[in-house]
Amino acid sequence: MVSKTLGLAIGLMMLAGSAGAALAGPDGVWELDSRDTRLQLALCGDGTQLCGALVWLSDADYNKQYEPFLNAPVTNGLKQTGANRWKGAMKMFGQNITGTITQRSETEMTLQACAFLVVCKSYQMFKYAP
C-alpha cells in the first residue's frame, strides 16, 4: 500500500514538473486563425526575447493598405515573462499595441493584444506548414 502511494506521489510530481516545461521554441512562421496573416517569429537578443515580422497577407488587393507593413518588424524583443510566454510592445498594421504571446504547444500559440489599453482581442496562431 505504501509503495503504491509513493509511486502515485512521484508520478504526480513528475507530471506537475513537466506542465511548465519549455517547448522546442517559437521559431518559425505562424498563421493567425483567420488564415489571412502570417508572422515570422524567432528568439532574439539574449535568447529569451521574442522578435517577429509580418511576412504574408492573404489577398494583396484586399490588403493593399497593409502592404507597407509586409516584412516590417512586429516586435523587436518581447520580454519573456514565464515559460513559453512573452509580453511587451508590438506594432501591427501601424498601430501600437501591447500584448502577450503564449506558446501552448509545438504548433499552437495565443496572441492577446490591446490597443489604447481598452480595445483587446485574442487570436489563435498555428505553426504554418506549406
Image: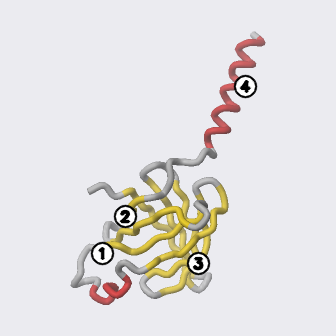
Q: What element carries label 2?
A: strand
Q: In this view, does 70 lie above or below 102?
A: below
Q: What residue type is labelled 2?
A: Glu
Q: Mark 3 points at which residue?
A: 89
- What residue is at 45 percent from the left and 54 percent from the top? 108
Q: Which amino acid does label 4 sit on?
A: Ala
Q: Position of residue 127 (x, y in %)?
A: 38, 56
Q: What mark, if any, has residue 9 been given in the picture?
A: 4
Q: Residues within 10 Å of mark 4 (few under 14, many from 20)?
A: few
Q: Residue furthest front?
A: 46
For this rendering, which residue is in front, 8 or 87? 87
Q: Is residue 14 left or right of residue 120?
A: right
Q: How crowded is mark 1: few (under 14 residues within 10 Å), some or many (20 or more)?
A: many
Q: In this view, does 54 lie above or below 85?
A: below
Instruction: Quote the CA–CA distance across marks 2 and 1.
Output: 10 Å
Q: What mark, if any, has residue 31 been given in the picture?
A: 2
Q: Classify the position of the C terminus by image quarter.
A: bottom left
Instruction: Quote the CA–CA distance across marks 4 and 3.
Output: 42 Å
Q: What residue type is labelled 1?
A: Leu
Cβ–Cβ under 8 Å for marks 2 and 1: no
Q: Is mark 4 on a helix, strand or loop?
A: helix
Disc 4 or disc 1, which is closer to the eye? 1
Instruction: Quote the CA–CA distance across marks 3 and 1.
Output: 22 Å
Q: How many marks overall?
A: 4
Q: Is residue 39 left or right of residue 103?
A: left
Q: Mark 1 points at which residue?
A: 57
Cβ–Cβ under 8 Å for marks 4 and 1: no
Q: Position of residue 49 (x, y in %)?
A: 59, 65
Q: Which amino acid does label 3 sit on?
A: Ala
- Of the image marks 4 and 2, the number of the one nearer the N terminus: 4
